[in-house]
Image (spheres, rainbow, N blue to C red):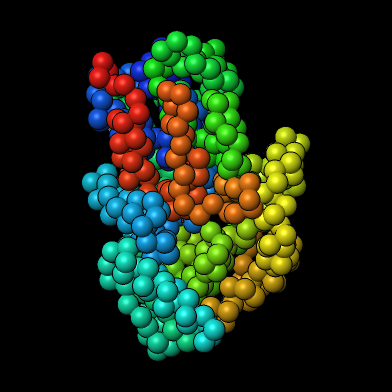
Amino acid sequence: MPTDEQHGAPAPARCDLAIVGGGIVGLAVARELTRRWPRASVCVLERETQLGMHQTSHNSGVIHAGVYYAPGSLKARLCVEGASELYEYCEARGIAHERCGKLIVATDASELERLEELERRAQANGVRGVRRLDADGIREVEPHARGVAALHSPNTGIVDFPAVARAYAQDAREAGASIVTGCGVRAVSVSGRRLRVAHAQGATEASHAVFCAGGWSDRLAVLAGAQPDPRIVPFRGAYLRLSGARRNLVRALIYPVPDPSLPFLGVHLTKHIDGEVLIGPTALMAGARDAYRLARVRGEDVRDTLAWPGTWRMLARWWRTGVVELRHAAWRRAFVRAAARYVPELRPQDVRPAFAGVRAQALARDGRLVDDFVFSHTERALHVRNAPSPAATSSLAIGRHVADEAERAFDLRAA
Ligand SMILES: Cc1cc2nc3c(=O)[nH]c(=O)nc-3n(C[C@H](O)[C@H](O)[C@H](O)COP(=O)(O)OP(=O)(O)OC[C@H]3O[C@@H](n4cnc5c(N)ncnc54)[C@H](O)[C@@H]3O)c2cc1C
């Protein structure tokens, strides 16, 4: 799944703009900066040997339409704009995608009020085409799904996000950016009018930098002089897949009505662009920021999570939800049962294990799971500090937002 990266460009000693992190957000930022400042020298510094190896290639692959997000939030605006730009981009670049539509299903009357709130949000956010369905309407769209009511969002879709990231990298490279892999950034310091970024290949002196490090964004921000709040706490999201013959249980995308006080959307059934049907993801606090295997534990990551006051405040509030997630992670039957609320024919023997992703979720000192995208500044640098779902959908719009910020914060007249 990772994005292929054949070009082992060496890290430059100097550049105008350095972007740290070669996931879909960093690459979208690089693409936008090279378009806006074609004379600026831009480099992307990525720690792994390939681009897009973390969240970019371990997610549900859904182009969200913008239904869920609080009106007026950055997520609401950047998702709606980003989804529409992403469809156009994929058309233009021949990237695999499908506007397959999605159902958000209420399984009993207790969920109807929240479904209405989602309908209001969709309208307020300018999401087009969303309509309310009754039980018969649900069956027309998804013959195997059951519920008392649903919202249908025809403009939600699926896409190959690693291919999107590859295309952004190609655009940036063609516009003159150097994209350097195997180049983990270890230290950041300001020296006069430049930022010294020390990394695995030595150091790069940049006029300015943008940090887009996903699950490690808090560490890089702190290295550059920012406050530690919010901290990234990794949440592992494991998926199951339907075995071949049972894929016909799901035509497109079936989602629950989410708990509005949590930033996760709940276990959903999603057709993937490669034809698989996935069930998931779970949301379990993980022992490493790259816990693709459940057993992976890294001392530094565990220490960072446990030493953060927000972790204990969050656990005090959400431990019951945590126990449910633990059951889903440990016991496949419970996981399948959660999905069978929406597709009752689903049986444990219909599923196989699939992959897992790790969400980079920002957690505030007061225990709040930070819902919205968060961007911040340090001297000569911008930081993308919280870019959870739907940041892949919103990537082109995030690229523009960051470039607007850069225009205000950086002195790029000479570039
Ligand atoms: C389970 C799951 C399901 C999701 N489903 C969806 C979905 O359906 N639709 C959607 O829109 N979004 C979804 N998302 C969210 C989406 O995947 C992310 O918001 C998006 O990929 C974030 O991109 P990114 O570039 O910020 O992070 P990443 O892709 O994680 O990239 C960060 C990069 O920074 C690099 N890096 C870190 N530290 C350093 C360092 N010191 N030096 C150099 N490089 C460094 C990393 O190696 C990595 O390549 C999902 C996420 C998860 C985990």
Which residue appears farthest toward the bottom when viewing the image? 136
* Front-most of residues 344 and 362: 362
* Front-most of residues 344 and 402: 402
Task: Identify whether 402 is placed above or below 150.
Answer: above
Is residue 213 visible in this depiction of the protein? yes
Task: Identify whether 8 is placed above or below 135.
Answer: above
In the rendered view of the protein, which quadrant contains the C terminus? top left
Q: Give me the residue at 50% from left, 73% from top.
A: 257
Which residue appears farthest toward the front when viewing the image? 366
Question: For residue 347, what is the image quadrant?
Answer: bottom right
Where does the image place residue 114, in percent across and percent down from the top left? Answer: 48, 76
* Front-most of residues 363 and 322: 363
Q: Please give left or right for residue 29 compared with residue 114 in the image.
A: left
Q: Give me the residue at 29% from left, 21% from top.
A: 412
Q: Please give left or right for residue 290 compared with residue 135 in the image.
A: right
Q: Give me the residue at 58% from left, 73% from top.
A: 339
Where does the image place residue 345, in percent across and percent down from the top left? Answer: 57, 81
Question: For residue 116, what is the image quadrant?
Answer: bottom left
In this figure, what is the number of numbered marks?
0
Where does the image place residue 228, in percent across and percent down from the top left? Answer: 60, 36
Task: Identify whether 96 is placed above or below 260.
Answer: above
Q: Give me the residue at 59% from left, 77% from top.
A: 340
Is residue 49 visible in this depiction of the protein? no
Q: Please give left or right for residue 333 compared with residue 253 in the image.
A: right
Question: For residue 231, what is the image quadrant?
Answer: top right
Where does the image place residue 136, in percent across and percent down from the top left? Answer: 40, 89
